[in-house]
Amino acid sequence: MKQEEFDKLKKAGEIAQKVIAYAKEIVKKEVPLLEIANKIDKKIEELGARPAFPVNLSINEVAAHFTPNFNDQKVAKGLIKVDIGIQIDGYVADTAFSIDLDNSEENKKLIEAAKIGLDAALEKFGVGVEIGEIGAAVEEAIKEKGFVPVRNLTGHQIKRFDLHAGMSIPSYATSQTEKLEEGVYAVEPFSTNGAGRVRDGNPSNIYHLTNEGNVRDNFARKVLNFIQEEYSSLPFCSRWIYNEFGSKGILALRQIEQAGLLHHYPQLVEMNRGIVAQAEHTIILKGNEKIITTKN
């Protein structure tokens, strides 16, 4: 890894820490999710970075992949997961926390289980470690708290402009013997009092470009060019398109999706509608060094 790349990754992590601290101040019960998302977007830009993906504000049984649209009326409540990505020139920091807005003992225990699962993974993490060992450590830690990990959500390797690159990091015991190599990883256990699996739910308002191509409508081509230049292969959301182009931009987004050029992420919902908590950090493995960029 070149020093310039390392420095940008570190800087993204430092900004992520500041954004997380800010988010913990503004995420309050009954505050509109749209207000929270817009404030987080603005804070990231004020700190000299850009979002690596739209902030996820996923509540209760929705484990991941929800962000408010431009006219969303939903408010913060329950157990909310706040998943934030920061990018500097395509170098990414990915981090998340969960907060209980219902003063629920069950929610608090779930959040603690996710944190302990993350700590167990980070303790094991290192070049040459088998990923199955990491999954086993996470599962054991979460089960000791009386819950189960979400088995079909994993941590992931990160590369420039690529959030899910190559290796996946399980959160349960497996026989996988693939070993960690130098690089950047997001480690993100999810704990639940449900079945321990998620299914696809409603559309999330989050997209990314999947195919090259074009659209017939001139305005839709303008929006497509904007998406290509602004977001490259990273995820974006309908809210950002509306902010740039207004309601015509939303119509253009539908045309681009219908042309088969976009993937529209579904919300990820716990199979038994169990409550889900999440904890996440980004880690760089560089020789014998283990640098958690998103942790103080």
Image: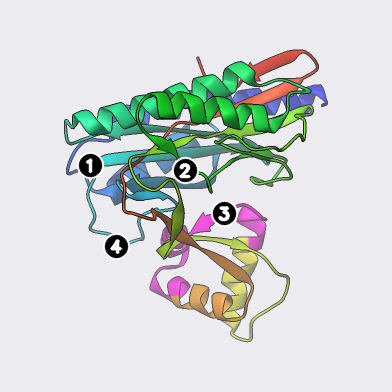
Residue 27 belongs to magenta span:
no
Q: Kindly report which numbered mark, 4 or 2, lies closer to the viewer in this rendering.
A: 2
Cα–Cα span, label 3 and label 2: 23 Å
Residue of label 4? 71
61 or 216: nearer the viewer: 61
Q: Residue at x 57, y 54 (%)?
A: 235
Q: Amino acid at mark 2?
A: Val
Q: Nearer the viewer, mark 4 or mark 1?
A: 1
The span picked out in magenta is 228-250
Q: Earlier in the sequence, mark 4 or mark 2?
A: 4
Mark 3 or mark 2, earlier in chain: 2
Check disc 3 and give the amino acid type.
Answer: Pro
Q: Main secondary structure of the magenta part?
A: helix
Across and down, in percent, residue 135 comes to: 59, 32
Q: Is residue 89 visible?
A: no
Under circle 2, the secondary element is loop
Dot 2, crowdedness within 10 Å: few (<14), some or many (≥20)? many
Q: In the image, what residue type sits under mark 4?
A: Asn
Query: Was residue 229 drawn as part of the magenta stretch in this picture?
Result: yes
Closer to the camera, 144 or 34? 144
User: x, y (%) of residue 115?
Assistant: 43, 24
Calculate the distance from the C-alpha at mark 1 to the C-alpha at mark 2: 19 Å
